[in-house]
Every structure is written in C-alpha cells, then in structure tokens.
Amino acid sequence: MVELVAKSAFDAAFPVEIGAVTLSEVDLGHVTFVQPLKGQAAAVSAALKSALGFRLPDPGEAVGAGDARALWCGPGQSLVMGDCPVLPGAATVDRSGAFAVLRVEGVTARDVLARL
C-alpha cells in the first residue's frame, strides 16, 4: 500500500541566506476558509469571538488574538489561521495545504521585494 507523507510546498528548501537577506518558510498551521451562510454573519462572528477572542474581519482587515488570526479574503469570506472551532451557520473548508508563505528578512529585504 502507498504511504502518503505530508510535505510543505517548499519541501525543506528554506531557510537560505543570500547576502544580507534571509528567506524562511512560515508554517501557518491550520487554515480554514469560513463563509457565513445567508443571515448568519453576526452569529458566526460572535461564535468566533467567544472561542478565539476575535470577530470576523471587516473588508481588507486582519484580526487576531494569541496564535490565531483571521484575514478578510473576499465579500463575506475569511481565512482563519490557527485552530478554528466548529462554527454553526458557516460553510468551512480546510485549506491548510493551499498556501505557502515565505518570510523575507534582512537589511536589504525591501530592495529584494521591490524587484519582484
């Protein structure tokens, strides 16, 4: 039988240091897409606040507490990073394997990012 092994998108290629810049992978942990059902946004936001200490984010906003965060990602849609509770009244999808995040740090990090 085939044994599946979870790997990151970067597959251990990082960290790497180039000159004054360090590139490293950021592990987001669990990522859950959350979309409240019609008329349920307030209840879902309240449930999130009760469980994690923050509400659903407004457009263009990121909110969080402790190790958990939520990012607005579209009208009525958010990504919750961290352990997401069961949210009655919302459609939720595990998106943990869908993202790869790279941290760029160092004295010339802005110069590197300007070239992208």
Image (tube, helix red, strand yellow):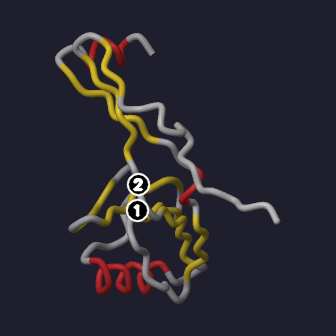
Res 56 quadrant in image = bottom left
Query: What is the x, y in percent for residue 109?
Result: 26, 19
Disc 2 to disc 1, C-alpha distance: 6 Å
Q: Which mark is residue 72?
A: none
Please state which of residues 96 and 9 is positioned toward the viewer in this rendering: 9
Residue at disc 2, secondary structure:
loop
Q: Residues within 10 Å of mark 2 (few under 14, many from 20)?
A: some
User: Relative to residue 3, is residue 8 drawn left or right?
Assistant: left
Q: Quadrant of the N terminus?
A: bottom right
Q: Is residue 78 above or below residue 40?
A: above
How many marks are shown on the rendered structure? 2
Query: What is the x, y in percent for residue 51?
Result: 32, 84
- Quick check: marks 2 and 1 in contact, CB under 8 Å? yes
Q: Which mark is residue 81?
A: 1
**Mark 1 is on which residue type?**
Met
Identified at 31% across, 28% down, the residue is: 104
User: Relative to residue 86, is residue 98 drawn left or right?
Assistant: right
Q: Which residue is mark 2?
A: 28
From this viewpoint, which residue is outermost toward the right? 1
Query: What is the x, y in percent for residue 25?
Result: 39, 39
Identified at 47% across, 31% down, the residue is: 13
Q: Is residue 8 above or below residue 43?
A: above
